[in-house]
Image (tube, rainbow, N blue to C red):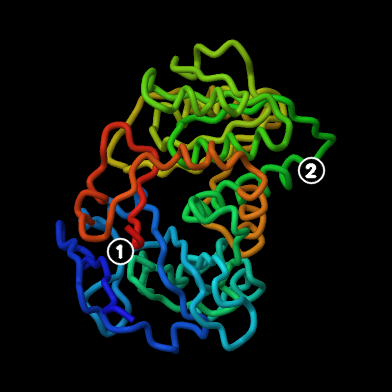
Amino acid sequence: MRAVRAVTVTPGVRDSLRLVPDHPEPPTDEGAILVEALAVGICGTDHEIVAGEYGEAPPGTPDLVLGHEALGRVLEDPTGTLQKGDLVAGIVRHPDPVPCPNCAVGEWDMCRNGQYTEHGIKALPGFARDRWRVQPKFAIGLDPVLAPVGMLLEPASVVAKAWDHIERIGGRAEWQPQTVLVTGAGPIGLLAALLAAQRGLSVHVLDLATSGPKPELVAALGATYHSVPVGQLDFDPDVVVECTGAPSVVFDAMCKAGPAGIVCLTGVSSGGRTIDFDAGALNRELVLENNVVFGSVNANRRHWDLAAEALARADQDWLKSLITRRVPVEAYAEAYAAGPEDIKVVLDFQL
């Protein structure tokens, strides 16, 4: 086997991104399943970590291996959970050691005390290295058809959770949703629209971009693309999935849902910005229309499994179109530099 290359940062130190050419082999205490890395996807969280705004190294080391959107191939699995050659992704979040009531029952995405850990983000090494290990309970086997796009499983798990919770909330009454508005056409927004389309709903996606691949990707789902402010839309959706985190869009989305509507917030605002809004009007809207607004982040194993099923039955050419750049490991700095028309950038360990 060749030496392990790993993309690392020193958390809290801006622009400490580097490629370590001879990183140690993953120790067996990380997990019994040994995996050859195929690719990792890069997202806004990675950019924040590289900028020194976020991230936590594992205990005893100053550095953090990046990469939480993983795709790999099994090299060995003595437990028999997977077979050599199987495609696999690693679940990002692990339960806290206490554990809190939610972590104790496998709902670690709803951790109550914040002591969870996350690969490539918080206190666990990530997957941006030639070989990594995973425990069987955190390993998700993938359909072979997903070999080119399996790194999309992590963002897909986030929206699978969002839809799971939307449907649970909808069950509070007789619920027959027809119209969905997704705000933002980045990877999360497009995957949220995909899962909405798979549910047979009328899907609308709103984004400021009027050129580039986004309008065509939305149209390919049979959805309608909008590039106007939320308040100018001529319909009141049953469901809104907000994926921008932009404060004005968040507020408008909360006000736009129809009666008994559900608004799921998946975008994370950067903070430090204020907007003027009528809190009383928002209160009146939510109360008198029986509307629900809730936040959703991360995913547990149930959602990863749902996401894997959703991706496997999706149009594979459409999924491939979400990947706008594939960058070899040696050009890692290019991969972590955001481009104006990027949707999903992938660091490819096989190029």
Quadrant assignment for the N terminus: bottom left
Residue under the point 65% across and 60% down: 305
Percent of width and height locating residue 107? 62, 66
Q: Is residue 276 above or below residue 5?
A: above
Q: Are marks 1 and 2 in contact (CB under 8 Å)?
A: no
Query: Which circle marks residue 316 in the picture?
Result: none
| Residue picked out by circle 1 | 55
**Residue furthest right in the image:** 174
Residue nearest the observer in this picture, 271 or 225: 225
Q: Amino acid at mark 2?
A: Gly
Quadrant assignment for the C terminus: bottom left
Percent of width and height locating residue 147? 52, 56
Residue under the point 52% across and 85% down: 32
For the residue carrying disc 2, how many other residues have a C-alpha within 10 Å: few (<14), some (14-19), or many (20+)? few
| Residue picked out by circle 2 | 171
Q: Is residue 197 above or below residue 169?
A: above
Q: Amino acid at mark 1?
A: Gly
Q: Secondary structure at mark 1?
A: loop
Percent of width and height locating residue 309? 67, 53
> As drawn, is 40 to the left or to the right of 92?
left
Percent of width and height locating residue 199? 72, 36
Residue under the point 62% across and 69% down: 102
Residue 103 position by quadrant: bottom right
Q: How many marks?
A: 2
Q: Is residue 293 above or below residue 12?
A: above
Residue under the point 74% across and 40% down: 170
3D distance between C-alphas at marks 1 and 2: 37 Å
> As drawn, is 320 to the left or to the right of 269?
right
Of the numbered discs 1 and 2, the one sitting upstream in the chain is 1
Residue 317 position by quadrant: top right
